[in-house]
C-alpha cells in the first residue's frame, strides 16, 4: 500500500470542462451590469462559490448591489449556467478520468468528489458518474468555500483518512490553496504557468507519469 489512501476530485475543470460554461454565464450576466468580464477577470472567479464569485465581480466592476439584486443575479447566473449544461453527457468527461477512477477502485483507494458547486450532483448524474464516488461533498455541504480547507477536511473525516494520506486533483488556485491548507498532496490539472504553490501539474490525467502513480499508490513506506 502506498502513501495515498483517498483521492479527492474537484469537478468543474477536472472531471468535466464546465468551467467555460461558468465563465460564459458570468459574462452574460456582467453585460447586464455594464461590465465586460474577460478571461483574466474570470481567472479570479475560478473555484469560488457562486456568492463569492458575484462579490468578486462587484469588486472588479466597482459597483454596488442591493441585497435583493444580489440574490436575483445569483438566480439569473444559475439559470444561464443550467441552460448551458443542458446537453452535458458522458462524452464530456475529460480525457483519462474514467480509466484513472477504475484504477483507484481496483486498488481499493477511497474516492470523493469535493466541488464548490451546488449543481455537482446534477452534473454527475448527467455524466452518469454518481456511483463512481464513495462520497460527494459539494457546495450544499460547506459553510466556507475554497480557498478555505473545510470541503477537503469534511471529506477526509467522512472517509476516515488522515489529510497526509489524501491526494487532491484541482484546476483552480483557490482549490490548490485549500488543499495545501488542509495538509494534503495536490496535483494541478491545467496550465502550470497559471497555477502556483504546487509540486505537480499536468494538462490532463493521461499525462500523469507511471512513476508518480507508483509513488502515490504502490511504493511501500
Ligand atoms: P455553482 P468546482 C466550482 O466548482 C466552479 O469552479 C466555480 O466556477 C463555481 O462558481 C462554483 O463551483 C459554484 O458553482 O454556481 O454551480 O454552485 O471547481 O469546485 O468543482
Ligand atoms: Mg474546478
Image (cartoon, rainbow, N blue to C red):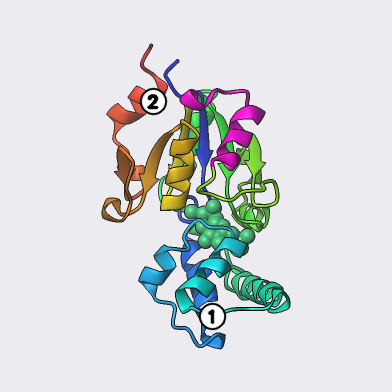
Marks 1 and 2 sit apart, C-alpha to C-alpha, by: 47 Å
Residue 197 in the image: state x and y as whole percent: 33, 43
For the N terminus, the quadrant is top left
> What residue does disc 2 label?
216
Q: Is residue 90 visible?
A: no
Residue that appears at 30% across and 37% down: 199
Q: Is residue 4 visible?
A: yes
Residue 84 in the image: state x and y as whole percent: 57, 73
Is residue 181 shown in magenta? Answer: no
Which residue occupies the foreground of this view, 172 or 51? 51
Which label belongs to residue 154? none
Please, which residue is most extreme toward the top here? 221
For the record, the magenta segment spans 149-165
Q: Is residue 82 above or below residue 14?
A: below
- The picture quadrant where one finds residue 50 is bottom right
Residue that appears at 45% across and 73% down: 60
Count of numbered marks: 2
Which residue occupies the foreground of this view, 111 or 118? 118
Residue 107 in the image: state x and y as whole percent: 50, 23
Mark found first going from the N terminus, 1 or 2: 1
Count neighbours of disc 1 (C-alpha within 10 A) and say few if under 14, some if 14 to 19, many if 20 or more.
few
- The picture quadrant where one finds residue 76 is bottom right
Is residue 164 shown in magenta? Answer: yes
| Left or right: 38 in relation to 35 | left
Residue that appears at 50% across and 59% down: 92
Residue that appears at 61% across and 47% down: 129
| Left or right: 153 in relation to 190 | right
Magenta span: predominant SS is helix
> What residue does disc 1 label?
63
Mark 2 lies on a secondary structure that is helix
Please, which residue is most extreme toward the left here? 193
| Left or right: 187 in relation to 134 | left
Amino acid at each position: 500500500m502506498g502513501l495515498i489512501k483517498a483521492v479527492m476530485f474537484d469537478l468543474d475543470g477536472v472531471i468535466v470542462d464546465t468551467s467555460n460554461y461558468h465563465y460564459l454565464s458570468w459574462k452574460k450576466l456582467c453585460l447586464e451590469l455594464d461590465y465586460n468580464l474577460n478571461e483574466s477577470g474570470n481567472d479570479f472567479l475560478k473555484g469560488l462559490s457562486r456568492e463569492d464569485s458575484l462579490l468578486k465581480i462587484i469588486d472588479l466592476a466597482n459597483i454596488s448591489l442591493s441585497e435583493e439584486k444580489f440574490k436575483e443575479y445569483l438566480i439569473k447566473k444559475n439559470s444561464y449556467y443550467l441552460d448551458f449544461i443542458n446537453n452535458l453527457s458522458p462524452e464530456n468527461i475529460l480525457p483519462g478520468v474514467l480509466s484513472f477512477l477504475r484504477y483507484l477502485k481496483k486498488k481499493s483507494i477511497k474516492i470523493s468528489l469535493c466541488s464548490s458547486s451546488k449543481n455537482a450532483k446534477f452534473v454527475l448524474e448527467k455524466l452518469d458518474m454518481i456511483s463512481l464516488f464513495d462520497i460527494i461533498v459539494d457546495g450544499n455541504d460547506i459553510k466556507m468555500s475554497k480557498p478555505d480547507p473545510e470541503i477537503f477536511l469534511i471529506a477526509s473525516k467522512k472517509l476516515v483518512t488522515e489529510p497526509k494520506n489524501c491526494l487532491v486533483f484541482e484546476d483552480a488556485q483557490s482549490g490548490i490553496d485549500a488543499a495545501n491548507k488542509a495538509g494534503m498532496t495536490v496535483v494541478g490539472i491545467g496550465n502550470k504557468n497559471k497555477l502556483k504553490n504546487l509540486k505537480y501539474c499536468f494538462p490532463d490525467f493521461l499525462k500523469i507519469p507511471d512513476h508518480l502513480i507508483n509513488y502515490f499508490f504502490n511504493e511501500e513506506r
